[in-house]
Image (spheres, helix red, strand yellow):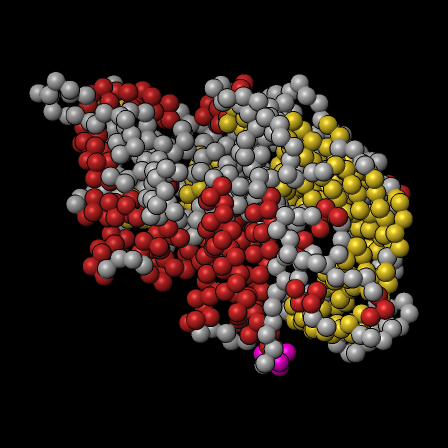
Amino acid sequence: MHLFAAHDNVQRAGVQYIISSVVDALKSNKDRRFIYVETGYFWKWWTNQEEDVRSDVRQLVNNGQLEFISGGWSMNDEATTYYQDTIDQMTWGLRRLNDTFGECGRPRVAWQIDPFGHSREMASIFAQIGFDGFFLNRIDSQDLQIRRTNKQMEFVWRGSPDNLGESTDIYSNVLFRHYSAPSGLCFDVNCADEPIIDDPESPEYNVENKVRNFISDWITPARSGYASDNILVPMGDDFQYQAAGKNFANIDKLIRYMSGKEIEGVKYNVIYSTPSCYLNAVYEATNGVLDVPLKTDDFFPYGSSDHTYWSGYFTSRPTGKGYNRFSNNFLQVCKQLSVLTDATSDEDTAKLNTLREALGVFQHHDGITGTEKENVAHDYIHLLHKGITECEDITSQALAKLTQAADTEFTTCHMLNISECAVAEKEESFVLTLYNPLGRPVSKYVRLPVVDDNEDQIDIRNPSGGRVIAQIVPIHESVLAVPGRNSEAKFDLVFVAEDIPALGYKSYFIQRTRQKSPAGRVTKSQAFPGKLRSLAETLGVSVEFQYYTGNSGDSSSADSTPSTPYIFRPHPDIPLQSIEVSHVTTYSGPLLTEDHVYYNDWFSAVVRHYNDSLVSEYVHLVGPLPYDENGVEVIVRFTADFEGKVYTDTNGREFIERIRNFRPTWNITVVEPEAANYYPVTTGISIQDGSTKGIVVLNDRAQGGGSVVDQTIELM
């Protein structure tokens, strides 16, 4: 949408106009420079250009006027993204640039100036890519003030201190004052600042005042925060340079007036530059030796003020976050099967790229975060679904080839999260093929929806022909009532698929028979009134479902900040509310015991205890939430019977310790005790006593979580 500016009523922006305008402006003056970050948007523009325009762009890239930095398909979020998604979208963007522009198009630095906080794993990935530096922006306001005061706006960030060590060190630089142009120097079509008038004869002559304000408001304060006399000044903002000629013409005047002049005792050399050129200048000015601190933690949660912690988006639009995880799994399967079966035709490659690019753009910091507008969120999901559908053609053909079943059409059940699968419900017999994309064998509990619970007439055979033990469990009534569910199934058939080989598959033959199955092979669950049993008996943990009431406010001041898709801010005067259990029905059988828990008309849960494992599974169905003008933030809290250290994952790659009301690099003042202690939980959160006891909660999508009370961990 932002490429074409098709909905100006939503956002006045059109990337196609920005790039075209910039190319024309750069061609008219060889001193001008411009950086471009997101390859996905550039590529959409590039594929629509004639060869003469492409030739001009290649020349601008070759002579350094147009420089690509970062170069991923999008400027990805750093909190809610899984590391595999980040690597994939970076790889695809960099590959497109390399194939198109060669060495001159290779980015040298990372430019992550808009994500809402910064991840240690992101620094590790950028270091391993080979970038020379990492430029970032949104860090906690308290941390920012200390860094400005102590000349610590530059530092070396070690992204994997406990595992990969110095190989993940990267020079990092925090922008002095956001990424917007300095006050009074915004010149694009959406700006209201006066242009620079440098004609002394004009009654509106203002260049001296513009320069004086620029120096006092921006340059002088910035000089105190960095290790050298080189100061990086961003000149732009969101969706700017739609009128690039206007922007550049005014910057030309600023450069002409300031360069080589001594103003208030300081001589200035002002030039068009880029982050990579700036980094080279810093290197030369310091002889490659910077006296800067080493950082080994991250920048979460990001607090733009003492009352404004951007930890709400860790959870916002959870359905989109869940669909992202499913889409990534499907992409990895699609890539693997395309290679294993040599499905590399132009048509197959195009289908694979549809999902690759949809998933890449969804990693955007206003995509997977859930902070986008509703119609944009729908568009993201539409693109992902289209990509999965096209990749399904590849996986179907590949599995048919691997299983030597050329005439077989493989289909995927996409709605198993609400127990809907037409094949399992309607076919008298079918083959279920399970593919394992991991590098190790796995065993997996499989759930398939069935219409009735007649266990005497269901037969499951493994690849060697042996009968498989299974259990039939009713589907929770709340799931049956999900709007849009197109299924008559009222039960799930559950069995264990054992030892699916690495990068391999297993097929199971399932049929409805008119003969009674052998006793004990397929068992109907026994139902009885139950209670939500605590795991304290076996794991030393109890579980509660509760909710915070959001803070009201109009954002007119820091104190009046409300809870939003970005911000988590509980109401300070309304205590945490418990969600009380109405009743529980328990179903028991040879494989598992399942508690169907009923709370109210907007919250229910299923708790599964597998008989051969200490692992329990919690599945929640939340919504529509009750109306409250302040908002409702639902959590699950796990309380241990021991004291312990709390850890959260970093983008699914490593774990990092979280200490309440503490930051490793500065003394934090906490006035929002819940929000300031919420962190991104992409794949897991744990509490460990350091010896024999520990609880690990693994989630199927990114969420916010933390420990705001002793001996507890919670997820929103």
Give the residue at the far left of this rendering. 201
Q: Residue 647 occupies which quadrant of the picture?
A: top right
**At x 32% / y 27%, what residue is drawn?**
182
Q: Where is 208 relative to 359, above or below?
A: above
The answer to whether one can see residue 127 in this image is: no
Q: In this view, does 131 lie to the left or right of 263?
A: right
**At x 81% / y 61%, what residue is drawn?**
453
**At x 28% / y 39%, what residue is drawn?**
241
Q: Residue 91: percent from the left, percent from the top? A: 46, 57
Q: Where is 706 relative to 702, above or below?
A: above
Instruction: Look at the image and say whether residue 170 sits in the magenta stretch.
Output: no
Q: Residue 250: percent from the left, percent from the top? A: 21, 32
Q: Residue 304: percent from the left, percent from the top? A: 50, 27
What residue range appears in magenta?
Answer: 401-405
Q: Where is 389 relative to 146, above or below?
A: below
**At x 47% / y 70%, what residue is drawn?**
348
Q: Is residue 646 left or right of residue 551?
A: right
